[in-house]
Image (cartoon, grey):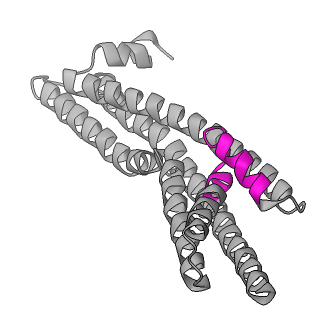
Amino acid sequence: MAPELSITHLMLNATWVVQAVVALLLTVSILSWAAIFRKVFTLKRVRAHNDAFEREFWSGANLNDLYAAAAQSSRHGGPMERIFASGMREYRKLCERQISDSTALLDGARRAMRASFQRELDVLEVNLSFLGTVGSVTPYVGLFGTVWGIMHAFTGLASLAQVTLASVAPGIAEALVATAISLFAAIPAVVAYNRFAHDIDRVANSMETFMEEFSNILHRNLGTKSAAL
């Protein structure tokens, strides 16, 4: 590529509007990639914690022992463990108040787990809307920079007596750089958004399934207590 048509040379000689658009797109692209890497590690850690807790839960461990361990490691555990701790905590509180209505006990535990589930889901969805916005908006920002650059290029050609390809190429090329960078920012963001949305849905489904299964266990325990009475 000739030096006068290199991207660096084109950007240094572009209009301030095109330079501002490119700088904005590069900044957004860097933030987008940072959000993507953070989300990859976050989801990987969440799946590992949830799988470990599920294995321990279904190994036949005592619910009170699990609750004690979950209460101690609430900050370092996974979402499923915190959901379990919320439901178990509310269930124990209601039992301590000597509430004998099994429906009230189960409803209280379910409401606590549902509230905890929503908080965990909100945390998992952090930066997801940012990626969606980047994927949908940056192509238009790049298009704005391209249109402005082309307008500036044709305005400059108005004073020339003879227009050649060599006189047109630099202005058009600098304008198209904005579109290229916008696509560089948008495509990874769209791919990551779709992938993360799918992964979060799978994690949410597994947590909802666990809440239902844990509710069934509590219901069986209540039935056993009633039969003993």
- Residue 91: where, in percent of width, then height? 61, 67
Residue at far top of view: 3
- Residue 117: where, in percent of width, then height? 55, 61
Residue at far bottom of view: 227
Q: Which contiguous range is marked in magenta?
A: 64-83
From the viewer's side, name the closer residue of 65 and 124: 65
Q: Does 100 sit above or below residue 20?
A: below
Residue occupying the point 31% across, 13% down? 12
Asked where in the image residue 226 lies, by quadrant, the reply is bottom right
- Residue 73: where, in percent of width, then height? 67, 40
From the viewer's side, name the closer residue of 153 and 131: 131
Q: Does 165 sit above or below residue 104?
A: above
Image quadrant in which the C terminus is located: bottom right
- Residue 169: where, in percent of width, then height? 34, 27
Residue 140 visible from this viewpoint: yes
Q: Does 115 sit above or below residue 21?
A: below
Asked whether, in this view, residue 178 is left or right of residue 117, the answer is left
Magenta: main secondary structure: helix
Asked where in the image residue 178 lies, by quadrant, the reply is top left
From the viewer's side, name the closer residue of 28 and 100: 100
Residue occupying the point 84% across, 54% down? 56
Residue 163 visible from this viewpoint: no
Residue at far right of view: 59
